[in-house]
Amino acid sequence: MAHDHVSYTLDSTLETVNNAEETAGRMAAAAGFDDEEIMKISMAVREAAVNAVLHGNAYDPNKKVTLAFERTASDLVITIRDQGKGLEASKIPDPLAPENLMKTSGRGIFLIRSFMDVVEIHPSQTGTELRMIKHVRGNAESKEALQ
Amino acid sequence: MTMKSSTRQVDGVTIVDLSGRITLGEGSVVLRDTVRDLLSKGQKKILLNLGDVNYIDSSGIGELVSAFTTAKNQGGELKLLNLTKKVHDLLQITKLYTVFDVKDDEASAVKSFNH
């Protein structure tokens, strides 16, 4: 069955992180990506979910994470939204800078940017929306396969 | 699948055979506890065999960095053995590949601790 758009509302738990990763893997496979791309997409979504659950919602049971997948003719568009304070991308230190290389955290957004074609971070007072796009190669064929 | 860890001694070096996923939660905790436990027992030559680690996330990368730094700060040495392609690529893009001492042969890795 084809889904051009599907969204999930999830609790702020570690289970959500694992579920988001698994769902992303299935969506990427359905969109026709190869194994390596599927791994990159599911890992990017895992990192985004970690940010939403830990840093955004801080495991608050009253706050939810929204995960949405949209399959367009040329792209897989994934949006993940939290209800935290809002992540300011400009304040994220560069994890490749020598002074940050041996830090034990701060690589999530970097990995997401490495694995996806387009990454947009939209912080607001009601939370952060992270929008990630992966272009589908040979999309006409895979679109047919999806349907 | 979560992570499994077992240790063995070869010529004074503790080899930690890890398998599964080093990710936020249980996997990272197992790695942290294993390395801390070894260091507290005075086992300071640690070779992490990652040959069966098929997945690692940013939390797992952070845990490897932490293990490396903790061992070093306690006068020990921590090296990595048998990286899978996924882990190798992740360490490359995060520029950590050259920070860690990475080996691909167990016997020569063990010898390298004793020189």
Image (spheres, rainbow, N blue to C red):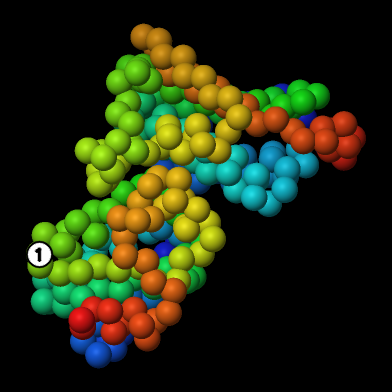
Taking the image as drawn, is residue B26 in sight?
A: no
Residue B68's place in the image compared with A73, above or below, is: below
Left or right: residue B98 compared with residue A139: left
Q: Residue at x 69, y 39 (%)?
A: A27
Image coords of residue B89 (percent x, y): 50, 53
Left or right: residue A18 compared with residue B73: right
Q: Residue at x 21, y 76 (%)?
A: B45
Give the residue furthest to the bottom. Answer: B11
Residue A139's place in the image compared with A121, above or below, is: below
Q: Nearer the viewer, residue A30 or A112?
A: A112
Taking the image as drawn, is residue A81 in sight?
A: yes
Image coords of residue B80 (percent x, y): 35, 68
Residue B43, image quadrant: bottom left
Left or right: residue A104 compared with residue B83: left
Residue A69, image quadrant: top right
Q: Residue at x 36, y 27 (%)?
A: A57
Q: Label 1 belongs to which residue? A: B74
Q: Nearer the viewer, residue B41 or B72?
A: B72
Residue A86, image quadrant: top left
Q: Amino acid at mark 1?
A: Gln
Give the residue furthest to the front. Answer: B115
Q: Quadrant of the N terminus of chain A?
A: top right
Callout 1: residue from which chain?
A: B
